Image (tube, coloured by chain):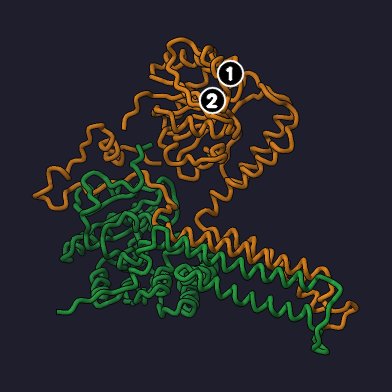
Chain colours: A orange, B green
């Protein structure tokens, strides 16, 4: 399972990238300094022929670059996800597509990945963008920390490094790949963050359009649903549906009670709030029923649903038959050497924290 | 960090085809002090049982020396397998990991803290042989604090027995033996491992009980408290219904649909008949007809949902094996 290269740098390109050549040159220097083999994976998010050609021309001659093209724009998140899947390196590093960060800081990320972290997120300090951006970012990061329970200072940082086994296990399609550190933490991976220098900020400052915020909020809702309720849909749908039924039933009961107790109003049949109450009950039952359908789907695939993550699986050291198959089964020898590492990983001198 | 073996892959020297007769599943969390002794005793007991067996210890992200202690045993064992979880996922998830990994057709779960006695295993196996599908241990003489552990547990067990219709005295005892066919398809989460006898009974398993020994804790600290009892009970009620529902979704949805349809007819009646004079009237508002239409819509919707569930069950991965565990085959002659 050995990888052909040590490090893959992934860049999602959404527009012309005047810095691209410079980025590839500078990071190549850093990788060469470290003595690691590397490749760049560029994912072009539906850029069209002319811009694609300009990007091709800006790549330095001889650089180890592979490109993936989208026929139309699917957004940065999916571009990065495709980049991660295309990567062949043992380590994968996502880079911002312009000279936003100090390339020398890549060493901190790779050092951390070498010292036991499975995923390392960048943390831009001090930030150089306008106050409005920093404020929004602060609120966003604080809110996400509180919602997810993962204390990270800079979820939007373009620099993320990870081991490829994290991608293999955690990466799901869609926009939640934005929250890879959160998902990795949930799967029990060791997630850290390193401070990196923020050189400059491109792009919008101030406030974004309403649609940007709406999309982000939907992404967060999707994340929370995926991390908390995928395996028990009835908890989520049941709570929402139950609330709706409760409110609707209260309204209907109120109308009926007024009628019975000889209130001022006439027959509840003539009161418009009956429609509202009944609609809420119907809506609640529908939502609840959807939760039941979700449970059936989980039920039919229960054997594939896993609420745990295994990081070590060691069979008995002595063979089971002890005469016939002893020679093959007793010693876990692998040609790649990896099973041996796994088998020795639990020896006494290995500190397991 | 250790390199990750593919989840579901077997370690070197293992073959999925080499089934064993008996799998012992032991989830452990920070039990370095007691696990070694338990494993030694367990191996002695298993040596005396004429069945091929494996022991699966699931280390649920222990922060102490548990994994090393288990691995020392593994070096001298021909049946011990370790599953290390990446972090603490909880006892039920750890148990599910064990169930997924187990290759035996009989599964026995036990606590890793040494409070269960391996000596009880042969008795449980005998009960399975006499025709039970699930045999639960009963810690008749509990060696725990009476107020904080024994008393709330006794109350909870009474209620669970009422709800599930399974007359067990001790749902919480981890020492249980199962035919694997009853486990393979249940998705375990939350505190569900306690409910397996109830869930099993809901799908036709014959559930038995046997008094087992219970030792006081020798080492370490207990990881349970009193606060979980209420959550446990509500979970159980929901799950019980859910399992029955899961086997016949169209029946339950259909029932709800018919009840709603009856309600809708009633609403139509109220919409067009004056209840005092029992004569047809035409009210000037559309409120009642609107409500009746809502109810009709819901009735149709529920029926469709039931059909959707049937579709998932009949075409999904369980389509051929759904009822298999509930059937016993017998050959004469």
Is residue A35 in view? yes
Residue depicted at 68% across the width and 35% down the height:
A138
Which residue corresponds to the image point at 66% horizontal and 21% vertical from the top-left?
A202
Q: Position of residue B50 (x, y in %)?
A: 15, 66
Question: Looking at the picture, does residue B193 appear above or below residue B62?
Answer: below
Locate the C terminus of chain B and report the quarter of the image it occupies. Answer: bottom left
| Residue marked by disc 1 | A51
Q: Quadrant of residue A252?
A: bottom right
Chain at tag 1: A
- Mark 2 residue element: strand
> Looking at the image, is A302 positioned above or below residue B278?
above
Residue A108 rendering spot, x and y as whole percentages: 49, 24
Q: Which label is found at residue A44?
A: 2
User: Cβ–Cβ below 8 Å for labels 1 and 2?
Assistant: yes
Quadrant occupied by the N terminus of chain B: top left
Badge 1: how crowded within 10 Å, few (<14), some, or many (20+)? some
Q: Is disc 1 placed on a helix, strand or loop?
A: helix
Pointer 2: residues within 10 angstroms few (<14), some, or many (20+)?
A: many
Residue placed furthest toward the left: A323
Residue A197 in the image, given as x and y percentages of width and height: 59, 21
Which dot, 1 or 2, sits closer to the camera? 1
Q: What residue lies at 54% left-to-right and 34% top-to-bottom?
A: A78
Residue B39, disc: none
**In front here: B141 or A60?**
A60
Residue B148 appears in the figure: no
Whole-angstrom CA distance, mark 1 to mark 2, is 10 Å
């Amino acid at each position: 399972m050995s990888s052909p290269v040590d490090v893959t740098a992934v860049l999602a390109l959404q527009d012309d990238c005047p810095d691209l050549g410079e980025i590839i040159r500078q990071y190549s220097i850093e990788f060469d300094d470290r003595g690691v083999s590397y490749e760049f994976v560029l994912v072009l998010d539906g850029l069209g022929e002319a811009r694609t050609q300009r990007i091709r021309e800006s790549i330095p001659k001889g650089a180890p670059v592979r490109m993936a093209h989208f026929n139309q724009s699917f957004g940065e998140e999916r571009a990065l996800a495709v980049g991660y899947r295309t990567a062949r390196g043992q380590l994968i590093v996502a880079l911002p597509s312009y000279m936003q960060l100090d390339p020398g800081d890549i060493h901190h990320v790779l050092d951390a990945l070498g010292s036991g972290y499975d995923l390392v997120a960048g943390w831009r300090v001090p930030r150089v963008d306008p106050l409005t951006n920093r404020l929004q970012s602060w609120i966003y990061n604080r809110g996400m920390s509180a919602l997810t329970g993962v204390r990270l200072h800079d979820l939007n940082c373009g620099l993320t490094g990870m081991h490829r086994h994290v991608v293999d296990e955690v990466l799901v399609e869609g926009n939640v790949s934005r929250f890879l550190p959160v998902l990795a933490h949930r799967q029990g991976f060791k997630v850290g963050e390193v401070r990196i220098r923020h050189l400059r900020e491109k792009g919008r400052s101030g406030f974004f359009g309403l649609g940007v915020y709406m999309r982000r909020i939907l992404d967060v809702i999707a994340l929370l649903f995926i991390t908390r309720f995928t395996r028990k849909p009835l908890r989520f749908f049941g709570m929402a549906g139950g609330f709706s039924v409760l409110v609707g039933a209260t309204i209907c009961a109120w109308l009926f009670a007024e009628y019975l107790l000889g209130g001022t109003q006439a027959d509840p049949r003539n009161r418009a709030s009956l429609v509202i109450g009944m609609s809420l009950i119907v809506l609640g039952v529908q939502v609840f029923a959807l939760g039941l359908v979700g449970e059936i789907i989980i039920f039919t695939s229960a054997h594939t649903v896993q609420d745990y993550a295994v990081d070590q699986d060691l069979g008995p050291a002595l063979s089971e038959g002890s005469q016939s198959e002893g020679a093959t089964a007793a010693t876990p020898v692998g040609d790649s050497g990896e099973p041996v590492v796994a088998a020795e990983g639990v020896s006494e001198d290995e500190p397991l924290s | 960090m250790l390199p990750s073996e593919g989840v579901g892959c077997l370690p070197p020297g293992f073959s999925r085809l080499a089934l064993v007769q008996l799998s012992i599943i032991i989830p452990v969390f920070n039990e370095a002090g007691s696990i070694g002794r338990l494993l030694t005793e367990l191996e002695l007991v298993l040596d005396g049982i004429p069945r091929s067996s494996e022991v699966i210890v699931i280390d649920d992200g222990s922060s102490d020396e548990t994994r090393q202690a288990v691995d020392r045993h593994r070096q001298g064992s021909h049946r011990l397998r370790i599953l290390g979880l990446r972090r603490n996922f909880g006892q039920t998830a750890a148990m599910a990991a064990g169930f997924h990994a187990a290759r035996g057709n009989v599964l026995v779960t036990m606590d890793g803290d040494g409070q269960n006695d391996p000596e009880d295993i042969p008795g449980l196996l005998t009960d399975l042989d006499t025709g039970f599908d699930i045999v639960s241990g009963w810690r008749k003489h509990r060696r725990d604090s009476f107020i904080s552990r024994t008393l709330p547990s006794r109350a909870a067990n009474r209620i669970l027995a009422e709800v599930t219709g399974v007359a067990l005295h001790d749902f919480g005892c981890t020492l249980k033996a199962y035919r694997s066919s009853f486990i393979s398809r249940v998705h375990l989460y939350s505190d569900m491992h306690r409910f397996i006898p109830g869930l099993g009974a809901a799908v036709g398993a014959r559930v038995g009980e046997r008094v087992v020994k219970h030792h006081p804790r020798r080492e370490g600290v207990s990881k349970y408290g009193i606060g979980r009892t209420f959550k446990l009970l509500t979970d159980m009620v929901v799950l019980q219904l859910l399992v029955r529902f899961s086997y016949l979704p169209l029946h339950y949805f259909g029932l709800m649909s018919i009840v709603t349809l009856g309600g809708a007819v009633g609403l139509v009646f109220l919409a067009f008949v004056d209840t005092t004079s029992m004569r047809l009237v035409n009210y000037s508002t559309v409120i009642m007809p609107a409500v009746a239409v809502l109810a009709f819509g819901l009735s149709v919707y529920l029926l469709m949902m039931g059909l959707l569930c049937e579709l998932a069950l009949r075409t999904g991965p369980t389509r051929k094996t759904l009822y298999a565990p509930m059937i016993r085959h017998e050959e004469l002659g």
